[in-house]
Image (spheres, rainbow, N blue to C red):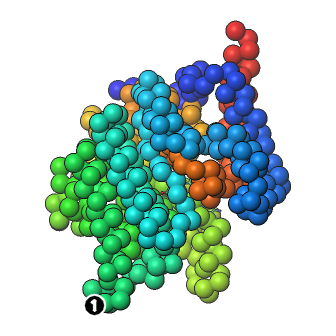
Amino acid sequence: MKNNVNLEDLETAYSYKSNRQLKFTYFIFNILQNQKLVKLLIAFTNGILKYNLPFKIFIKKTVFNVFCAGEDINDAFLKIKYLEKFKVKSVLDYVSEGENNSESFDNNTNIIVSNIIRLGKECPGNYVSVKITGLENPKFLTYCNGMKLVNDLIILPRFDRLINRIDLICKTAHASKVIVFIDAEDRCMQDLFDEITETMMEKYNTEYAVVFNTLQMYLKDRLEYLNSLIENANKQNYIPGIKLVRGAYVEKEREKAIKDGIVSPVFDTKKETDDSFNQAVEICLREFKKVDSCIATHNSDSTIHAINCIHKYHITNHYSKVRFSQLYGMSDNLTFNLSINGYNSSKYLPYGEVRKAIPYLIRRSEENSSIDGQIIDEVKRLKKEIDRRAKF
Ligand SMILES: Cc1cc2nc3c(=O)[nH]c(=O)nc-3n(C[C@H](O)[C@H](O)[C@H](O)COP(=O)(O)OP(=O)(O)OC[C@H]3O[C@@H](n4cnc5c(N)ncnc54)[C@H](O)[C@@H]3O)c2cc1C
């Protein structure tokens, strides 16, 4: 177990990319640096994507190509197997945002279930992620959030169908020994997601964490929730799976809070979010005997903090207790340098139809074009590696 991990070894970081791919990624990230252009492209995409096939091809050949594994599950499996050669695991993420009827929710469930079975057989040790809004309508989920549904005879059958979908996914994951990450989304649905995920964890996380909940540490209430989750899990005799993220919906949450006339649930400053995230890392790793964790970030300081905690708390079995994860197409310097140094690291690997991946791609583009994002460092790293290769 090495303590001094060089997260800036770029030869290792981009070893999986050909010269052509590297230059193409550099080109795309350069475009994403331009905030005005990104805003324009997003408006354009929202407006005409449905009708304009050539534009869809344009997206497929540009941002989709950098941030997604492909439209087809077989493309995704090829990527998973390729990444395995670099000791990098994958979190297979079937992207299907914005669907609205029970038939498509059942269909999504079946796709995720068959992906889990195939992963268990062909690529054991890799994971899946699930967005609950791919299994039910966000409006319905928001309505159910925080409600006692037991006596609501109108809502109950539909709610039961949702639980059955999630249970089928978790049960299959348990049987196939595939870990499943339940993603966090808007705060107005999160109490419901917590409740459901805790029920699944209690059922399936008896030996190790099969099901992981996601905690968005930009939320002011999450440190308190984290402590109570660990305490309750301990009492109920299960191992909580905890994926820590900062949170992807800052602006949306703030706008909603203003509209609803409430105090924003998100911290006011980046520093507060950083402190909350790093404290959560410390708690999860200090409690490693009771908790399985996933540190999902592109932030180098938080990654180094987690590595330091692994050493501070002598987590000798860290490969099975602490996972690191980055989104496909971003922060390869972390993923590949962690894996080569013996840490459990993975890529969140989205795949699916271009049309259904648009909200995901918009979030990535906005994140990468935001002023306090890490795009500048990403571009510098890509350029440095292109120059280094050019010398040889
Ligand atoms: C593997 C993986 C899985 C993910 N899964 C999810 C998920 O399930 N749900 C989800 O919501 N997100 C998810 N994300 C995205 C994540 O929440 C972040 O948006 C993204 O990773 C950027 O944060 P960072 O820690 O990587 O890095 P940084 O660049 O250090 O942090 C950027 C983040 O800081 C926060 N921030 C920025 N400015 C402010 C401010 N002024 N005030 C308060 N906070 C601020 C925001 O959360 C912003 O996204 C995932 C990310 C990864 C890597």
Q: Nearer the viewer, residue 196 or 81?
A: 81
Q: Residue at x 53, y 46 (%)?
A: 351
In this picture, is 15 found above or below 152?
A: above
Q: Is residue 224 visible?
A: no
Q: Which part of the image, by quadrant, shows the N terminus?
A: top left
In this image, 154 relative to 350: left or right? left
Residue identified by numbered label 1: 151
Q: Can you give x and y, in whole percent of width and height, for residue 258 in the image?
A: 65, 81
How far across and down, in percent of the image, does residue 67 sit?
A: 61, 43
Q: Say which residue appears at 68% left-offset and 27% top-offset.
A: 22
Observer able to see residue 200: yes
Check disc 1 and report its element: helix, strand or loop: loop
Q: Residue at x 41, y 81 (%)?
A: 144
Q: Is residue 185 above or below residue 308?
A: below
Quarter of the C terminus within the rendering: top right
The picture places residue 50, in percent across and down from the top left corner, at: 70, 60
Tell me which residue sits at (51%, 78%) in the image: 139
